[in-house]
Image: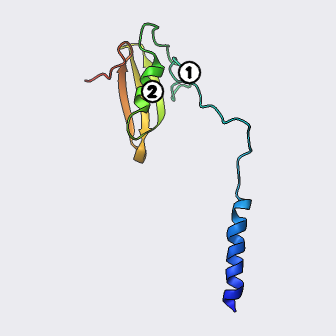
Amino acid sequence: MYRLVLIPAVAAVMLAGPAFAQTAPATDAPAAPPAASTEAAPSASTDKPTTEAPAEGKKLTEILSGIEGEPGFLRFDDIEWDSGDGTWNIEYLGTGGRKTTVEINGTTGEPVIE
């Protein structure tokens, strides 16, 4: 008796479940990702843009695209220009919540090894 009632009830819930799921409003075009800039991102501590890198250096977009190609890369966390030593200080998150910080020479685009 219970099977006769339970099986159709479960089937009805399974079929109707997706109809009640929340969906994002439909749009005609997919949202474009934010464009990478050659400027440094605002500092998390001051919320003010840092100094721009010099024009003769390697473009930030080229540096960031190289980091994005790293295995396990998820997203950038912080990007700052250090005008004192001419380097980009870049923090990014990887799989498993791993946070990596790299210092990149602003002229050559190569990592600074200390």
The image quadrant of residue 84 is top left
Rendered location of residue 79, percent (x, y): 46, 26
Rendered location of residue 41, percent (x, y): 52, 24
Return the residue at label 2: 65
Amino acid type shown at disc 1: Lys
Return the residue at label 1: 48
Query: Where the C terminus falls, by quadrant?
Result: top left
Q: Secondary structure at mark 2?
A: helix
Amino acid type shown at disc 2: Ser
Rendered location of residue 53, percent (x, y): 46, 13
Does 90 sit left or right of 42 as displayed? left
Residue located 73% across and 39% down the image: 27
Residue located 70% across and 68% down the image: 15
* Label whose residue precedes the other's in the sequence (1 or 2): 1
Residue located 33% across and 20% down the image: 110
Rendered location of residue 109, percent (x, y): 37, 18
The image quadrant of residue 58 is top left
